[in-house]
Image: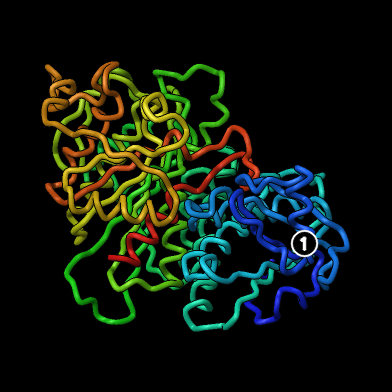
């Protein structure tokens, strides 16, 4: 889909459809259609509520073949995240109908750098379909070829906003494409190969540690998880260096859990819904996607992405409940539940980040079912040992419309993780499961400022939205990118 800025006035745009955002408290578009919009409101065919649509054929004086009204809800509350949703809504509504060229005119409060960027992101995200492996793709021949954004003046800032929105949207779709791959096709080594190919294309440094190198380093927690699988693990490191010498000594690490399929190991999961456990590498996919955009948008600080990639299987060599492993840091862990594997591989990855030049650590992981019990499928959980870094992450997430909620991290929660036989247990019992998982990770960050994002409730959509397809969401690619850009 080609996305372009244009100074062609709305009434003169020739396209299959001209999009107009209209609100519950403001009937936009009347000046273009000689009152046609008000007629729709008066007849109750359109009310302006959020995500509502109406299509009008041969709309009076417009050169466009159709007028498409998009509901914006209350105009006073309308922001970039609403614009992002409308971009996706427009594409997902009109593409199946055979529209090829669509356009939207932005002015007034709807015209800003953030609005253009969000609109472009939304359009690209809405264009994603999870049918990559279908041989008979529904509507495969129906594609929106051009999305034109009409603005009064093509300023440098707006051109950059379109470029940034495209980079971030495509990066998020890259992550979604990875997550959508089944475990038989996307093994740990294949995931590492995908990251390497992307890194080479976009000029990132890439290093992949194999099993022997991890063993030499002493990554016993990670290797313990991978023991039960015939598929060898991989430890992926991607490096971005700013084009100009950084003005700060800060070095951001983004770390993602990369379990390409999670059976639970010996502590095997119930069969119902296990097929979705291909999404357990959503954190790794998000850091790879974020680095794809970071390489293009060039923030001023160095960023290192780290992804420990394994498969968690109940093979004859799998670790058992009660096993004790020694982490890269040197602490011993009693494995009380082999389905709490994500925190084990992240323990070694976070220590690696802390010991290899990174000053600030942020990780993303589909870590606990407890987070979905607490927050549903709307928010990621945020856990941190540093209020300043947590505030930066929350600010980035708010700007990018990825909802997050901070949790307490009192030292008392560590009591749940006590083990009589090792330095720490890998689970803390039923209560406060997402918090005790975070407290476990905190043991391995070497006192560096750190934020953990538990994305288990938001990394997968069981049912599609009007603006987003069913399946992987690509969260939190946008937050990672914004965090680096706004550092």
Residue 210 in view (yes/no): no
In-front residue for pair 394/412:
394
In-front residue for pair 356/175:
175
Q: Residue at x 23, y 76 (%)?
A: 246
Q: Residue 288 in the image: x percent, y percent?
A: 44, 56
Could you tell me which quadrant the N terminus lies in? bottom right
Q: Residue at x 32, y 66 (%)?
A: 486
Q: Residue at x 31, y 50 (%)?
A: 394
Decide: few, some or many residues near mark 1? Use Cα within 10 Å; few <14, some 14-19, many ≥20: some
In which image quadrant can residue 438 be found?
top left
Q: Residue at x 42, y 24 (%)?
A: 265
Query: How did the renderer colour the structure?
Result: rainbow
Q: Which residue is mark 1?
A: 35
In which image quadrant can residue 455 be found?
top left
Q: Residue 473 in the image: x percent, y percent?
A: 53, 45
Q: Residue 181 in the image: x percent, y percent?
A: 59, 43
In-front residue for pair 291/484:
484
Q: With respect to residue 7, does 23 lie above or below?
A: above
Could you tell me which quadrant the C terminus lies in? bottom left
């Amino acid at each position: 889909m080609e996305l372009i800025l244009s100074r062609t006035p709305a009434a003169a745009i020739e396209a299959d459809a001209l999009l107009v955002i209209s609100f519950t408290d403001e009937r936009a578009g009347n000046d273009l259609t000689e009152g046609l919009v008000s007629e729709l409101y008066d007849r109750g065919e359109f009310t302006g509520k959020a995500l509502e649509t109406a299509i009008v054929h041969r709309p009076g004086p417009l050169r466009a073949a159709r007028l498409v009204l998009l509901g914006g809800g209350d105009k006073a509350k309308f922001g970039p995240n609403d614009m992002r949703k409308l971009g996706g809504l427009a594409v997902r509504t009109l593409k199946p109908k055979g529209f090829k060229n669509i356009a939207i005119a932005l002015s007034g409060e709807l015209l800003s750098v953030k609005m253009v960027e969000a609109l472009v992101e939304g359009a690209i995200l809405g264009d994603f379909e999870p049918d990559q492996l279908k041989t008979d793709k529904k509507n495969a021949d129906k594609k929106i070829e051009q999305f034109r954004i009409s603005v009064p003046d093509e300023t440098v800032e707006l051109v950059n906003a379109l470029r940034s929105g495209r980079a971030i949207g495509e990066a998020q779709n890259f992550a979604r494409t990875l997550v959508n791959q089944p475990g038989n096709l996307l093994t740990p080594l294949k995931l590492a190969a995908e990251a390497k190919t992307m890194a080479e294309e976009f000029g990132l440094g890439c290093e992949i540690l194999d099993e022997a190198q991890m063993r030499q380093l002493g990554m016993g927690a990670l290797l313990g998880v991978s023991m039960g699988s015939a598929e060898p693990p991989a430890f992926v490191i991607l490096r971005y260096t700013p084009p100009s010498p950084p003005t700060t000594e800060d070095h951001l690490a983004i770390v993602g859990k990369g379990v390409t399929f999670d059976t639970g190991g010996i502590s095997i999961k119930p069969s119902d819904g296990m097929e979705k456990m291909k999404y357990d590498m959503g954190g790794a996919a998000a850091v790879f996607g974020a680095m794809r955009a970071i390489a293009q948008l060039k923030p001023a600080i160095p960023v290192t992405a780290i992804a420990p990639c394994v498969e968690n299987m109940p093979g004859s060599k799998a670790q058992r409940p009660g096993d004790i492993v020694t982490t890269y840091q040197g602490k011993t862990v009693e494995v009380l539940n082999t389905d709490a594997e994500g925190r084990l591989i992240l323990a070694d990855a976070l220590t690696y980040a802390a010991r290899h030049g990174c000053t600030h650590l942020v990780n993303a992981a589909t870590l606990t079912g407890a987070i979905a019990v607490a927050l549903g499928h709307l928010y990621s959980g945020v856990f941190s040992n540093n209020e300043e870094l947590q505030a930066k992450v929350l600010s980035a997430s708010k700007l990018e419309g990825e909802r997050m909620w901070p949790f307490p991290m009192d030292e008392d929660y560590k009591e749940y993780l006590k083990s009589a036989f090792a330095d720490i247990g890998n689970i803390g019992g039923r209560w406060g499961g997402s918090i005790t998982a975070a407290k476990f990770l905190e043991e391995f960050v070497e006192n560096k400022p750190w934020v953990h994002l538990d994305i288990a409730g938001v990394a997968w959509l069981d049912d599609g939205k009007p603006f987003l397809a069913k399946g992987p969401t690509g969260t939190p690619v946008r937050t990672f990118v914004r965090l680096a850009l706004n550092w």
